[in-house]
Amino acid sequence: MPMPKILHIDTGRAFRGGQRQVVLLAERLQRQGIEQVVACPVHSELIRRLASIPTVELSTYSLVRKLYLRPLRDAILAHGLTIVHAHDSEAHTLGMLLKIAIPPLKLVVTRRVVFPPRGFFGAWFKYRRQVNRFIAISAASAESLVKAGVDKDRVSVIPSGIDLRAVENAPKGDPEIDA
């Protein structure tokens, strides 16, 4: 079986927990020799922290990202990417649009929230029809997906990882570590 080639999409402009998870995952996959590209907003902290991994710069405007998928499509075709891993809600939408445009793609969605997807578009079309696999960061996140009608055999619980180097190197009394 050939190695997967992954396009990660994260649309967050700030660097928070979800973006930290993207960095940790991308670095780990890179060490395992898995080819990947990360798409995120131009000038974001995420791009800066992924210096050794190819990136695609996305517009800082949400509507532009949805209407202009060419940078993502071009990266998929240029690198032979086979999986789109969407890391936030807007990335889920972009991944769904890409999967519709390029049907052989597999779509993996990470869901970090515990409220169920809402509305026809979110709950039925976006999540039930297009996503091949869900990663929930907690049992509560997984349960909210199942309550929304997602097949439980398509949901895996994978808790968020931590950067042990940051914990080990943090000064005593660091509020981010001691909290």
Image: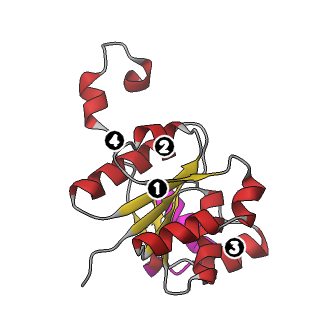
| Residue 108 shows in this picture | no
Q: Name the residue under label 4.
A: 162
Q: Specify few, some or many for label 1: CA neighbours under 10 Å numbering under 14, 14-19, or 20 or more.
A: many
Q: Report the Cα–Cα distance between label 4 and label 1.
A: 20 Å
Secondary structure of residue under mark 1 = strand
Q: Give the residue type that dot 2 points to.
A: Ile
In percent of width and height, residue 144 lies at: 58, 65
Q: Mark 2 points at which residue?
A: 47
Magenta residues, start to end? 139-153
Q: Which of 132 and 137 is in front in this view?
A: 132
Q: Report the Cα–Cα distance between label 2 and label 3.
A: 31 Å
Q: In this view, does 137 lie above or below 131?
A: above
The N terminus sits in image quarter = bottom left
Q: Specify few, some or many for label 4: CA neighbours under 10 Å numbering under 14, 14-19, or 20 or more.
A: few
Q: Which residue is drawn at 43% across and 50% down?
A: 22
Q: Mark 3 points at which residue?
A: 123
Q: Name the residue under label 1.
A: 38
In percent of width and height, residue 126 lies at: 66, 75
In-image side of 170 versus 40 (left or right): left
Q: Is residue 148 magenta?
A: yes
Q: Specify few, some or many for label 2: CA neighbours under 10 Å numbering under 14, 14-19, or 20 or more.
A: many
The C terminus sits in image quarter = top left
Q: Give the residue type that dot 4 points to.
A: Ile
Cβ atoms under marks 1 and 2 closer than 8 Å? yes
Q: Is residue 164 above or below residue 130?
A: above
